[in-house]
Structures are given as C-alpha cells and as structure tokens.
Amino acid sequence: MQKIYIFTGKGGVGKSSIAAAHAIKSAEEGKRTLLMSTDMAHNLGDIFERKLGKEPENVLSNLDVYEIDPEYVMHNDFSFVMEYLGRLLSENVMSGAIKTETEKRKEDGTESIQSGLQELGMMPGMEELFSLLKVSDIYRSGKYDRVIVDCAPTGETLSLLKFPELLSWYMEKFFPIGKVGVRVLAPVAKAVFKVEMPNKNAMNDIERMYLKLAELEELLKDRGTTCIRIVTTPEKMVVEETKRNYMYLNLYNFNVDGIYINRILPREIGNEFFDKWLEIQREYIAQIKECFAAIPIYEIPWYDEELKGERAIRRIVESVLARTDVFESRAMIEREKFIQTQDGYMLEVYLPYVDKEDIDLYQSSTDLIIKIGNFKRNIPLPNILRKYTVSRAKFEGEKLHIHFTP
C-alpha cells in the first residue's frame, strides 16, 4: 500500500535531515521512495551534495529526490489558468510605474511585455497550493511506494495543509454559477469594466484544479495513507510551538503519529560548560513525553559532525531508525477535539480504561492538565480559550467532556 509521510516542525530543528534518513532507510528496504521538499528554501540538494533539477532525480537505488518549483508546476500543469491571470494582471492590476516601464522597454525594443505574474511575482498562497497538488499527482501516479515530504516551517505547513479545505469551500459555493456567469458576463466585463473573464480552457483548468483539491483533502486526512511527524528540539520555544502545532493539526483531524526529539546532547559529554544545557534538555524531554504520551517518540542525538552527505545521514538510520519499524502504519485515534457550544467551547478527550474517580484536571495559563493517578498530560489550549475557564466536566463512555465559558 502506498503511504505519504509528512515531516514538519519549527524552522531549523533538522526536519530535512530526519526526512532524508527515513528516505534512505525506505530505499534500503526495497521500497520505491520519493523524498520531496515543499519548502521554498530547499536544502535536499545540499544534504545529498548534488544539484537538483525541476523534476525528480535518482540519487540512490530505489530513491529519487525532488525539490518542487511551484512556478514550474503552475506553468506546466495549469497553463490556461496562468495565461488568464497573466493577462488579467498585466492589463488591469499592474501599477502605473510597472506598466509604464514595461511599455517603455517594448518601445525601445529591449524587451517584450512580460505577463503580470512575471512582473509582480507569484500570488500569495499559490506556492503552497501547487506544491500540494504536485504531492497528490505523484501519489496518484503509483510510481512510488512511499512519498516522504520535507515541509516548510510550522506556520507555512499548517497553511499548506488546510488550503484544500479552505479553497474547496469557496469553489463549492461559487463554481456552480461560475461557468454560466462567464458566458453571460464576458462581453459586458470586457466592454464596460475592461476586465477579461477567463475563457473556456481556463475554466476547465479551474474545474480540474477543484477536483484535484477534493481528492487531495481526502488523501491528506486518510489516516491509513498519510502520516504527519513533528520534529522538535528540547528547548522552551520549540517545545511550545510543537504543542501548538500538534493541537492545530489535531483540530483539522490530521494523523500525527510520531514525535522526533532532535539534537539531544550526550549525558557523558564530560564538560562543565554543558551541564546547564543537559539539565534544560532533561526538563523539556520529560515535558514532551508527558504531552505526547500516546504517540511514538524518537530521540535523536546531537552528532559530532555536520549532517551532510549520504554517509552522515546514515548515522541517523543506524543509531535511531534501525531499531524500530518507523514505517509501521499507525492510524492514531482522534484523541481530543474542540467543539463550539452555545455558551462557549467544549473539549472532548478520549480516555480509555480510566475510572472516573481517578481523573483530576486543572487549567494553567496555556495548558489544560489532566492527571490520572501518577500520570498527567498537558493539552495545549488554542489562543481563543486563553480567556476562558473550565466551568464543568463530565466523564461518560470513555470520553471526558470539559466545558469552557468566558
């Protein structure tokens, strides 16, 4: 069965190296593997010490590497949409300064008029959209057994993953009348408003893109197909962002099935300079294990060399990944979800095999702490609930319902 593994986390925590290590291990297991980057600041080529092109390139037996160029994807896979947007922007949206300069170059014979997109750059959100669509296309092609995705830092990844759901909502509301509207309004729009409506080919491209988005949303939320793994380091700011990252991914019902704690200092380092750092790391490693107790956690040491080149990346494979089946299918159950109610919000938490009398809970400034016997779990609260307090709680059917009011 084909699988997609998405690696995300705060910038600079080592996502690319850990994703590359998984790709090498997957290839060694004889699986046709693609390691791809959706981060605009690509560094897979740096890791494998080779220049990569605009299409997947083979670097090892069973392993291809691909750094997505969304602009290349846009112009090759959705050319009619881009042609329309280019004409629309160049004729109606460009500022006078840009348009004047473009016309001047044309008069001088030094350069032909460029499309509006080339003049103004890529529209916001388009990079994430087309990167995601390419992930879906590659999966649907069936060429690879495993697709391993090295994502951009947390914020961009969250935007990327929720993009299909957001855009699909607009398409469902407006697209049914879109084709009729184009046929009726095209002559009027061109003559009166000087705005060119999309032609038939562009509308077909938009429809095709909408269908791809619907497929993509289904694919990303299929817990048997797509796994999301969060990479973190044992530092306060990174741990706090990891907690928020998990909470938001859970809010959108994605399957987070792995936490990777990277750059752990060796305890036997034998240098007083690092004593305080060792203490700090121990504290945050314990906190991570408390917060993500039901999710597999992998601890990756801080190596004594820069992780570049195949040989260096293999150290992660041999010291951490070789000891377990990291590609095992783990469709994690929905552990908690926030629901809006008439008087506030309700948090529903799945707590199997628990007696009601053993449950205790209290709220800190940023977390809700649930304690069961000698074990406790911190659940990060969304920012909107920071001004809410727990008003009541009820445990029934292995689910704890916690109500928040202003």
Image (cartoon, rainbow, N blue to C red):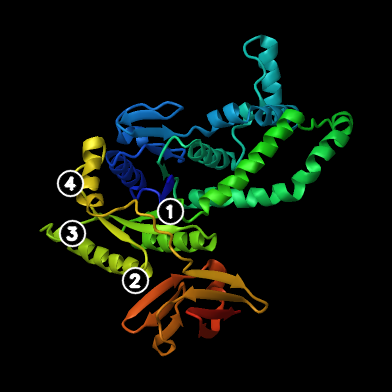
Dot 2 alpha-carbon crowd within 10 angstroms: few under 14, some 14 to 19, many 20 or more: some
The label shown at residue 228 is 1
Query: Which residue: 46% across, 51% down?
Result: 226
Query: Which residue: 59% across, 27% down?
Result: 75
Indicate the amino acid at tag 3. Phe
Query: Which residue: 40% across, 41% down?
Result: 145
Q: Answer whether labels 4 and 3 touch (C-beta < 8 Å).
A: no
Dot 3 alpha-carbon crowd within 10 angstroms: few under 14, some 14 to 19, many 20 or more: some
- The numbered mark, 1 or 4, whose residue comes first in the sequence reads 1
Asked whether 110 or 302 is in front, the reply is: 302
Residue 128 shows in the view: yes
Q: Which residue is mark 4?
A: 304
- The numbered mark, 3 or 2, whose residue comes first in the sequence reads 3
Indicate the amino acid at tag 4. Asp
Alpha-carbon span between mark 1 and mark 3: 32 Å
Disc number lying in front (2 or 4)? 2
The label shown at residue 290 is 2
Dot 2: element: helix
Where on the picture, by quarter, is residue 289? bottom left
Q: Position of residue 378 (x, y in %)?
A: 40, 73
